[in-house]
Image (cartoon, rainbow, N blue to C red):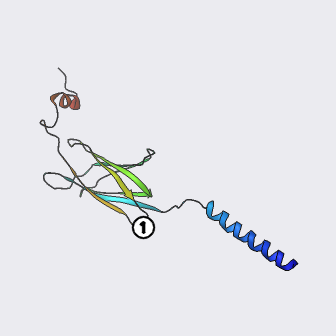
Amino acid sequence: MKKLLIAAIFTLGAQLSFASAGNNAAPSSTTTCVSGTVVDASTKKPLADVTVIAVTANSKSEVVTTNAQGQFKISSLAQGTYTIKLSKDDYKNQEKKDVVVKPENSTKITVEMVAETLETNSHRSWWDKYDLYL
């Protein structure tokens, strides 16, 4: 009877130990990336030197710049949902919301940026952009 009681206590202790370890396990450190290409909306040519920012809901961000082929890669992102913000001089800023990043695979996106023209801007904003006041 004593051996049965000791075996039961040992088994119960082991089960509690494993259950406890499962609840206190460290969050997964698996990271992944977002990559893609940025092109001009009308010419479909790649855009170099575009600033690409991946922003999380809690405002953490990662920043990269596109290469000469318009390509970018933001590495070491944790699993989650991001807003990808893109900006370049003489182009309208772009945002891709709700980009889901999963650890199983990288996420790829393509973004077309629209060139700013005097028709798409008010005269006032053009003057502000170049700080031209008489």
What kind of element bears circle 1? loop
Residue at the disc numbered 1: 104
Residue 102 horizontal/vertical position (percent) = 41, 62
Of all residues, the one furthest to the front in this rendering is 1
- Who's the residue at 80% across and 77% down the image? 7
Residue type at mark 1?
Glu
Of all residues, the one furthest to the top in this rendering is 134
Q: Is residue 13 left or right of residue 33?
A: right
Residue 111 horizontal/vertical position (percent) = 24, 54
Quadrant housing the N terminus:
bottom right
Give 105 or 11, whichever is nearer the viewer.
Answer: 11
Residue 27 horizontal/vertical position (percent) = 55, 59
Q: Is 79 above or below relative to 129?
A: below
Number of disc labels: 1
Question: Which quarter of the figure has residue 124?
Answer: top left
Question: Which quarter of the figure has residue 90?
Answer: top left
Q: Is 2 above or below relative to 25?
A: below
Quadrant housing the C terminus:
top left
Circle 1 residues within 10 Å: few <14, some 14–19, many ≥20? few
- Who's the residue at 40% across and 53% down the image? 81
Give 86 or 95, whichever is nearer the viewer.
Answer: 95
Of all residues, the one furthest to the right in this rendering is 2
Residue 59 horizontal/vertical position (percent) = 43, 44
Q: Is 2 above or below relative to 96?
A: below
Q: Is 44 above or below relative to 1?
A: above
- Who's the residue at 75% across and 69% down the image? 13
